[in-house]
Image (spheres, rainbow, N blue to C red):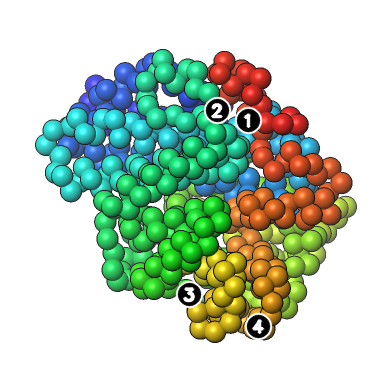
Amino acid sequence: MNRFSRYCILLVLVSMASCREVLEPKSVDLLEDNLVLNEPADVQPVRIGLYSALRATAAPTVIAGDFTADYIQHNGTFTDYRELATKQITPANGAVSALWGSLYRTIYVANFIIERLPQVTGVTEATRKSVLAEARFMRGYANFIATNTYGDVPQVTTIDQIANRTVPRTPKATILASVLADYQAALTDLPNITTASTNVTNNATYLNKITCRAALARYYLYQKNWAQAESFASQVISSGVYTLVPNYQDVVVKDFIPESILEVGYNLTDDPGTGNFALNNLFVSRREVIPSNQLVASLVNTESGERVQTITFNAQNQRGNDNGWTVRKYGTGTEDNNNIVLMRLAEMYLIRAEARAQQGKLAGADGAVADLNVLRTRAKAPAVAVANQADVLSAVERERVYELAFEGHRWYDLVRTGRAQAVMSAFSPNWNVRYELWPIPQSEIQQNTALQGKQNPGY
């Protein structure tokens, strides 16, 4: 078998359909893995495979973060999206399985690199350290999403086929401790960038120390470690590597803008505009889901400023329950906005604003209100006035809706802030506290005996 064929096999491994068994890869994959990472020339294709695995997590994460919450209403025929929109989610939901599968594929490829790369001779120490750091980051990132989506999840740390057949659920706290350890290890050896590069695409596509600091800022926000969240967000903002674009419209209609910290790209041959879990297909082609009336009301409010450009209106679409509004953020392969942004600089301002508000730092140049007004000025929205802590925290929540709509944050935000029950019960009569976690996919429970009888409560 030639090297090209072996590289193709790895790429197939990380792009399998969601129904493929993840915790127990077929033996043929493990046999081919023995061939793929044997010499220095194999390292770069395996690294590309790792980024390909990450890319597959992007659309399902947006679906989890925004479709589970109050951003969408069902407008099509697919059962998966009707369940999400009407808050009647089941363990057999295809989107639930798609996210699980993509996350564990990322973890598997990361573990493959972590296990195999140290054994490959002839690789420079600098390359070995940086690629291992990328693998540690990716594993941590995938585990972070997994545990915040499903709760206690299997902690897979090996590519051993036998060991991975019966991996039990691991407490969320243990998973999060491993996430922090992976991020800290990655931060040590990822490449350093000290100034903004003319190659914006590279800054957003490949990991560096600033990327990891941004992930740590989000990590500590979720952990309610306000001081650390503020510190890491400040490090990202003050680095100068990433800058806010002057016009919010560019956030909606352009790829690889200067504020993108981590972004996954596509081309005509792997365009996300087609497929069951492709965002452009869901939002535009099929109009399977449309912006909810509640979200539309928020975005057309003058408080959102130019963030209303996230959605667009066409009266010709108005019929039945269709309100005529469509999400603009995700285009096709022939458009300049078909990528998916995983982290961008605006989120760092929002993280810092929330962390500062939680610490009582409200006014002044180093206060939460100043951070909110940076984004509101960019969006040509009215400035936020200094108020009490509760009002500022409410302003942060609203600003995250305006600024980050359809980037996969809303449900996670509501759950982590304890606001899910209040907001979602007003949105849907079917809302139940069980929906603060997604169910473990039914297919995984059937395949992994250690998961049987261990479904999340209420499912």
C-alpha span from label 2 to label 1: 10 Å
CB of mark 2 within 8 Å of CB of mark 1?
yes
Question: Quarter of the image containing the C terminus?
Answer: top right
| Above or below, 127 relative to 368 | above
- Which circle's residue, 2 or 1, is located before the other in the chain? 2
Looking at the rendered structure, the number of numbered marks drawn on it comes to 4
Q: Earlier in the sequence, mark 2 or mark 4?
A: 2
- Residue visible at 40% across and 59% down? 213
Q: Is residue 430 above or below residue 228?
A: above
State which tag comes first along the sequence, 3 or 4: 3
Which residue is the site of mark 1?
Answer: 440
Whole-percent x, y for residue 35 in the image = 25, 24
How far apart in space, not on screen, are marks 4 and 1 (Cα)? 43 Å
Q: Amino acid at mark 4?
A: Val
Residue 230 or 161: which is nearer the viewer? 230
Q: Which mark is residue 169?
A: 2
The percent position of residue 210, horizontal first and vertical second, equals 36, 61
Viewed as shown, does residue 396 lie left or right of 421? left
Specify the quadrant of the image occupied by residue 458: top right
> Which comes sooner in the sequence, label 4 or label 1?
4
In the displayed structure image, the side of residue 275 where residue 312 appears, left or right: right
Tell me which residue sits at (60%, 41%) in the image.
149
- Inspect the image, locate mark 1, and give the three-letter code of the amino acid beneath it: Ile
Rendered view: 377 above or below 234: below
